[in-house]
Image: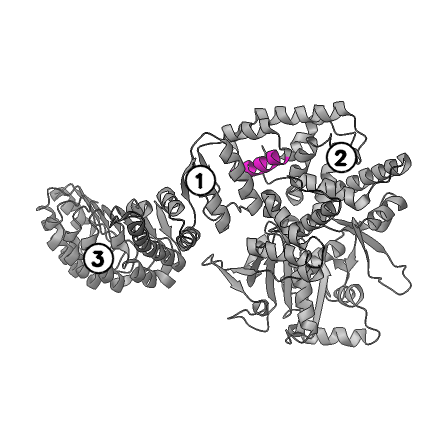
Amino acid sequence: KNSAKAMEKELVTCSLQEKEKIPIDRSQIFQIPQRKDLETKVIVVLGKAGMGKSILIQKICQDWSNGEFSQFEFVFWFDCKQISLPEKQYSLKELLLEFFVKPQEGSKEIFEYMLQNPDKVLLIFDGFKGLHDHENFPRCSASQPEKDLCSIKELLSGLIQKKILNGCTLLFTARPKDKLYQYTSKVDKTIEIVGFSPQQRELYITKYFEESLYCDCALKLIKECEYLFSHCYSPVMCRFVCFLCEAMLEMGEKSLPSTLTEVFLKFFQQKIMFLQTDVTTTQNQENLATLARVAWCLGEKHQSAMKSDLIPSKEVKEFALKYGFFLPFAFPKHSDSEEEEFGCTFSDFVIQNFFCALHLLLAEELKDKNLTKYLSFLSKKKKPFNWLDLMPRFVAGLMFLQDDPCFRSLSNEDEKQSTKKQKTLLKYIRRLQINTLCPERLLELLCCVYETQNNYLLQHVALRLEPKLSFLGIALTPPDVHVLHSILKRSRKEFSLDLRNSSIDMQGLQALVSLRNVTSFRASLSDTVRLWISLEQTKDYELLKASTEKFVLDPFKAKTMKDISDLSDLVEMQEKMMNCVREASGCTSYEIPAIRNLRKLEFALGPACGLQGLLKLVKILAAFPSLQHLDLDALSENGIGDEGAKSLSEVFPTLTSLETLNLSQNKITDLGAENLAAALPSLSSLKTLSLYNNNICDFGAENLAKVLPAMTSLRVLDVQYNKITGVGAQQLTDSLRKCPHMKNLVMWNPTIPYGVLEHLHQLDSRISV
């Protein structure tokens, strides 16, 4: 089991420029190119709770102790839950040489050596949060920040601001929502730990049970419960599910619970194994209720640890430690004469979330109507209980499990009370205007309703979903996808899904697009093409054809080189599809509808990759027969220059549907304008041409003027903010007289005298002043 827990998970680094995920090796974590070695390096490892961030940190420390990461002579690892209690203050020396490890001798010399050699020091802060509250985050104001006492927030602030131990390496682990806000510019590298793939889930479960009597049937049993198997993408959830599966197999059970709430009810039952005496049961119920209140009070403050003397009673503390709900730790002493202090922290974020839900249901002071406010579906602001993100799901699930024997063993609540709470939730959700919920709140609602497993509620939300559902930019985990799939399947409506930037995995994407009532979808090009390649390899031609017909691409905006590569892969996929269709039906031609129907393409790669990206794009432009709008104008300026203009002009004859061409702000000169002019008449449908804010002079204007009469479809030409003088302006005006089809010529330039432009406007009102 230990080997299963220590399994290596895939690391993913996210480039802020490309937003492309690249798997990296653990040895690459501290590699930061183009950085001065003398400055503090800040690395952030992101991952949802339970993804294995702490396991990764343990592995880094283990590797260092075995001789890897030899650039560091000192590695300090802190659990932020334990050091971030608000009443505690530390000096840097105390934090390093008292809290973490206390050398038997030479503390002063060791600390002085670290101050003189900060580049040899790695500080790891695991479970980092609190800096998101940037308005209240203190500046480090200590006169001797390395030696003066200050709060952990001040210490962290001083480290990040390079006022303390400048030159060291800082490694933070945090949840994706616990962002650094005002310190993002100081972060040198961001890494994200993603969950297990289906294959990794199977490997974990197999390793967990490899020495068990149930090794043959456990994996099969877990996979049969698709919802629980989807939760196994999270290593910590996978461990809970495996624990429960093992316990239930030992009891002779043949199936697992259907929801996460049931899993944790069973988990608590297996942990505590209530004895059949009224005294013990009552005492356990009281201890659980007290622990639930403690969990809630800490959760409201975004905390999971407290000083031991603040725990309500010795019995509660012993109960929590006995059953593994609490883990103990010791605080550093400011002096040898000071008495040692101890603290306790909840052993796991899920346990604390479940205890919080229990508190909301068991607390006598909370009325039924107040329960619904903790679901926070209607709040337009940041979720007030964001840190307890599983709590609303547990609350909803427990409301409909209050008759369950497991819940009865935790509570002495009467049947009337539980029925009343169920009715309160039913009434609340019936009144919700589901169509007004933002995507994040809608997803939370679906997950909460799924935990109830109440057929009426499931059908109610399924029938009230909007036909167009956008989850753009919302992270969809495997459990989220399972819930969404389950509820969409219940509806009679047809749906259009936007799944772009949702980090949906290939299995989830396949499940959603295979639904008959999902008639169209948008997703990242790379994910979609990867799915199609997989379907082609497994010869699932029916789903391959169906999913290509549902895929929507228009309009498409290319922001990175990867977007251009993905677009090329899509065109290449069409050629493979033609072969598949030819094999299946004998038809000799096939077009992916998304390629055939693309009408607007925006190109915004910026100056660094603009020309390179365009040279790659022009090779596939001919594959889009319906392209009407090609926009190469970007705020960051693509700067394709004359080389790009020449390359683009060579494919003009293939762009028979193009109506709008925007080449503004691309550093095109007379040479580029000459190449464009030679090919422009071949754009037989072109209505609008913009060359705004380039470097075109009179020679370029002359070439454009020569071809204007031949461009019979053109209605608007914009050559503002170039370097055209009165000479070039006169040539364009003379050509305009031969173009009755033209409606507007916009050519204000700082190099054209205003009087000249005014005179030309009087000659032809189609010229804009």
Q: Quadrant of residue 141?
A: bottom right
User: In this picture, is 119 found above or below 663?
Assistant: below
Mark 3 belongs to which amino acid?
Val
Q: Is residue 105 magenta?
A: no
User: In this picture, is 631 found above or below 269?
Assistant: below
Which numbered disc flags the more N-terminal residue, 2 or 3?
Answer: 2
Which of the numbered marks, if any, corresponds to residue 426?
none
| Place of residue 58 in the rendered image (x, y in percent of width and height, measured from the top left) | 69, 64
Residue 493 in view in this figure: yes
Q: Which residue is mark 2?
A: 407
| Place of residue 296 in the rendered image (x, y in percent of width and height, measured from the top left) | 74, 40
| Place of residue 347 in the rendered image (x, y in percent of width and height, measured from the top left) | 75, 51
| Place of residue 187 in the rendered image (x, y in percent of width and height, measured from the top left) | 57, 61
Total marks in image: 3
- Judged by depth in the image, the label closer to the viewer, 2 or 1, is 2
Residue 52 in view in this figure: no
Mark 2 belongs to which amino acid?
Phe
Tell me which segment is drawn in magenta: 439-451
Q: Which residue is mark 1?
A: 497
Q: Which residue is mark 3?
A: 651
Task: Measure how far apart labels 2 and 3 are at the Cα level.
Answer: 70 Å
* Residue at the (62%, 45%) spot, across then down: 228
> How many other residues sit within 10 Å of disc 1, few (<14), some (14-19) or many (≥20)?
many
* Most foreground residue, 692 or 304: 304
Q: SS class of the residue under badge 2?
A: helix
